Amino acid sequence: DGGRKGGASGIWGARKKNNAGNEFILITDIKQLKKGDIVITNNGTWGHVCFMDQDYSASKYMKVLGQNQGGTSGKLPGAKVKVIDWAFKSYFLGAFRYRKWNDNNPSSFFPAKGYWGYGDTSSQIGKISAFMYKTFPSYTKKAALGNYFGKNLKASITEFQKRTGLEADGNVGPITLKELEKYGFKY
């Protein structure tokens, strides 16, 4: 079975030798898989390395990105890439998750597009500030309360938008408010 699992088993087997645990969380329980995890499977000739495209589900398949398939792609012989694929869970060997993804500290990177605070009133911002501090204490600091346009509040909302994949639409914009409602925010 060495050919079937060769490449994938080699990657998974080298995890300890190369101190993968320093930078990655090593996942051996398939039920712990989350979107973005780097998954090692033993299917195909050499196994596969792919990314989870959803959190674990009860299905017998894993929705993954970057699963190599036999065939040709364009002018290149050998393999074509299926961007979205469904891999059998029975092929799961293990997975890696970047430790940085579990870091609860807000990043200093704010990639959101759009505007900040346009049309927002101080009472709206104050209400969200209090909610953000109560619900996501690691995203903001108490100092932002009472300072309606404070940099801590701006950072916390922007970080929330970044982590949920939202575009900035003002901190009381409809997209952000709808997402905050999932966490119990009532406007």
Image (spheres, rainbow, N blue to C red):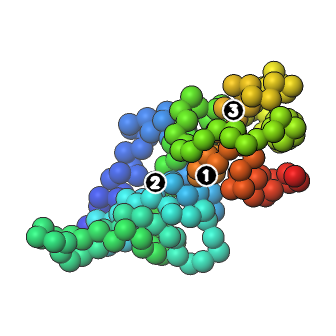
Q: What is the C-alpha distance between the residues marked 1 and 3?
A: 14 Å
Where does the image place residue 63, in percent across and percent down from the top left? 50, 70
Q: Residue at x 42, y 44 (%)?
A: 15
97 to the left or right of 136 = left
Q: What is the C-alpha distance between the residues marked 2 and 3?
A: 32 Å
Task: Of the two numbered discs 1 and 3 on the same chain, state the one appearing first in sequence.
Answer: 3
- Residue underneath mark 1: 166
Above or below, comparing residue 80 to residue 136 in the picture: below
Q: Residue at x 79, y 58 (%)?
A: 182
Q: Residue at x 76, y 53 (%)?
A: 177
Task: Of the two numbered discs 2 and 3 on the same chain, state the one appearing first in sequence.
Answer: 2
Foreground: 13 or 132? 132
Where does the image place residue 160, in percent across and percent down from the top left? 67, 43
Is any part of residue 135 visible from this angle? yes
Task: Of the two numbered discs 1 and 2 on the same chain, state the one appearing first in sequence.
Answer: 2
Mark linked to residue 38: 2
- Residue underneath mark 3: 154
Where does the image place residue 43, in percent across and percent down from the top left? 37, 71
Foreground: 73 or 41? 73
